[in-house]
Image (spheres, coloured by chain):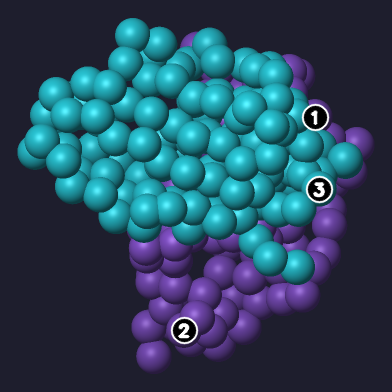
Chain colours: A purple, B cyan
Amino acid sequence: GESVGLHLPTLSVQEGDNSIINCAYSNSASDYFIWYKQESGKGPQFIIDIRSNMDKRQGQRVTVLLNKTVKHLSLQIAATQPGDSAVYFCAERSWGKLQFGAGTQVVVTP
Amino acid sequence: EAGVAQSPRYKIIEKRQSVAFWCNPISGHATLYWYQQILGQGPKLLIQFQNNGVVDDSQLPKDRFSAERLKGVDSTLKIQPAKLEDSAVYLCASTGMKKETQYFGPGTRLLVL
């Protein structure tokens, strides 16, 4: 069936560098996408979202890019900090239901 | 603004026992969700409420799981009897009028022995 997936299960990033987390989706009917950050022992925390009629959206230190042609979503984190270490999930909304990918573990090294 | 509240935070039970989780959504949020998150996976929707009515429970194992939101505010999720494979984090989320961004609680970590 159609699903959301992530290319890399673990991403190691040096502090101060930019991080890019990728996500592939296969449901062309999805109209809304969200990135969540989940730290150990906590619930998912909203980072940024984007509607399907947009291709880029920026927040504080984060940018989400949507490429509908290849069904690809990415999250860019500028100047990665130790506090950015977490699991990052992309989620797509189709027919009103949110489907999550498996997640990418981001490890920030000094 | 207070976030989504859940209790208990941790629960350990033996298989075939019953367990209940409680969620209080963000004030004013009409839509409430229960998710199951197995270790190493993304959250999976179990049930969605709009006020006190069920919108979607297609992925809820109804032979053992039940949920209610009687007054359209807080909600309980029950498992009876529990199985080993029910060990997971149970997350509650809510959304406001825009029905887009879901805000999650800290979750209840269940271990079934």
How many numbered markers are drawn?
Answer: 3
Describe the element under mark 2 as helix, strand or loop. helix
Residue A41 position, x and y percent, is: 37, 63
Q: CA distance from mark 3 to mark 2?
A: 35 Å
Q: Residue furthest front?
A: B71
Residue at (32, 16) in percent of width and height: B64
Quadrant of the image occupied by residue B97: top right
Task: Give the quadrant of the C terminus of chain A.
Answer: bottom left
Q: CA distance from mark 1 to mark 3?
A: 25 Å
Q: Is residue B62 left or right of residue A16?
A: left
Mark 2 lies on residue:
A82
For mark 2, name the chain: A
Residue B99 position, x and y percent, is: 81, 37
Describe the element under mark 3 as helix, strand or loop. loop
Q: CA distance from mark 1 to mark 2?
A: 32 Å
Residue A57 position, x and y percent, is: 84, 57
Q: Residue furthest right?
A: A53
The answer to which of A24 and B55 lies nearer the viewer is B55
For mark 1, name the chain: A
- Is residue B60 at all visible to an observer of this figure? yes
Mark 3 lies on residue:
B28
The answer to which of A20 and A44 lies nearer the viewer is A44
Amino acid type at circle 2 is Pro
Q: Are marks 1 and 2 in contact (CB under 8 Å)?
A: no
The answer to which of B92 and A77 lies nearer the viewer is B92
Q: Are marks 1 and 3 in contact (CB under 8 Å)?
A: no
Does A85 appear above or below A14?
above
For mark 3, name the chain: B
Task: Name the mark on residue A31.
Answer: 1
Residue B72 position, x and y percent, is: 71, 33
- Is residue A71 at all visible to an observer of this figure? no
Describe the element under mark 1 as helix, strand or loop. loop
